[in-house]
Image (cartoon, rainbow, N blue to C red):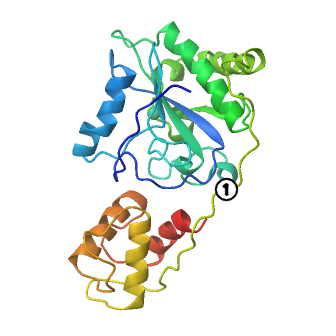
Amino acid sequence: MGREMYLKVNPYTNPDIVITEVRGVVWHYTASPGATAENIAKYFNGTCIVNKRYASAHDVIDAKEVINMIKYNRIAYHAHDRNRQRLDRRRYGSNANFTTLGVELCIDKNGKLQKETYALAVLHGAFLMKKFNLDPIEHNFMHFQITGKNCPAFWVSDPIGFEKFKQDIASAMKQSDKVVEPIKKPTTKPAIKKYTLPTGIVKLGDKGTKVKQLQTALNAVKFKLKGKVDGIFGQDTLQALKRFQSVHCNPVDGIYGTKSRAALNKLLNN
Ligand SMILES: [Zn+2]
């Protein structure tokens, strides 16, 4: 539903990482009075990348339209904040970016959610619930519920307003099959190539198969090497690994060990 303005693939706003499965929708607000959906899409495709800020969402909604920025089978960076995930971890994992879609709501010049934006959000919420066979009451969340961030501020201060929003989505699902796509059976998950990840420590100066496996894995999760997969752990591999660690695990030391392995395994072999 809505217009497509896909973000270019880049490490900060659209890392081109496959989503595990859509099990919920997380609602955000832009915190940017007067900015339109198009303004926000352009920001995520420009300034946000230039500023090397890890942030994005799948969709953004203003009073006029819904813009889809990231395909629903790829993750956005919207609901993870240093392991503060508060939802049921059996369903949503430790990083909700892999199991939820993020939708940004625009606000007017005075910081208010306009009624037209709300109405579009209800319809779009109904569309997403049906598309992914989700329950409107159980599977819609405020960003606040996941990490404690004050987002969307207008619902954090008015939780009943958010409950009403969910009810309105439920009503829209019952009423209007015309604006909402029919329920589709979930398609079988795309076959994901399995990757062999090296065991033990791999570090600067190392050579051989383990380094090749690491280089292949880094390329696969889009923290790409500038050069080739050559089995030589030089500066190029070091920098790619550090960029990966800065997003997915600690410490950011450029040394591959159990934590880097676990993080790569989660992304590639789930
Ligand atoms: Zn948010």
- Look at the numbered disc 1 and say if its residue's Cβ is closer than 8 Å to ligand 1: no
- For the residue labelled by badge 1, is the local secondary structure a helix, a strand or a loop? loop
Depth order, front residue of 177/145: 177
Q: Quadrant of residue 133?
A: top right
Depth order, front residue of 202/219: 219
Percent position (x, y) of residue 177? 74, 20
**Ligand 1 shows up in which quadrant of the image?**
top left
Percent position (x, y) of residue 236? 24, 74
Percent position (x, y) of residue 104? 46, 28
Q: Does residue 254 sit above or below 184 in this rendering?
A: below
In this rendering, does residue 183 appear at all? yes
Q: Does residue 175 sit above or below 129 in this rendering?
A: above
In the picture provided, is 158 more to the left or to the right than 243? right
Q: Residue at x 43, y 81 (%)?
A: 213
Q: How many marks?
A: 1
Query: Which residue ends up furthest to the bottom in the rendered image?
Result: 208
In the picture provided, is 193 more to the left or to the right than 80? right
Location of the N terminus (image quadrant): top right
Q: Residue at x 45, y 47 (%)?
A: 81
- The crowd level at tag 1 (other Cα within 10 Å; few <14, some 14-19, many 20+) is few
Q: Does residue 87 sit above or below 191 in this rendering?
A: above
In the picture provided, is 166 more to the left or to the right than 231? right
Q: Quadrant of residue 216?
A: bottom left
In this rendering, does residue 31 appear at all? no
What residue type is disc 1 on?
Answer: Lys
In the picture provided, is 35 more to the left or to the right than 174? left
Which residue bears the numbered disc 1? 189
Percent position (x, y) of residue 141? 60, 32
Depth order, front residue of 73/57: 73
Location of the C terminus (image quadrant): bottom right
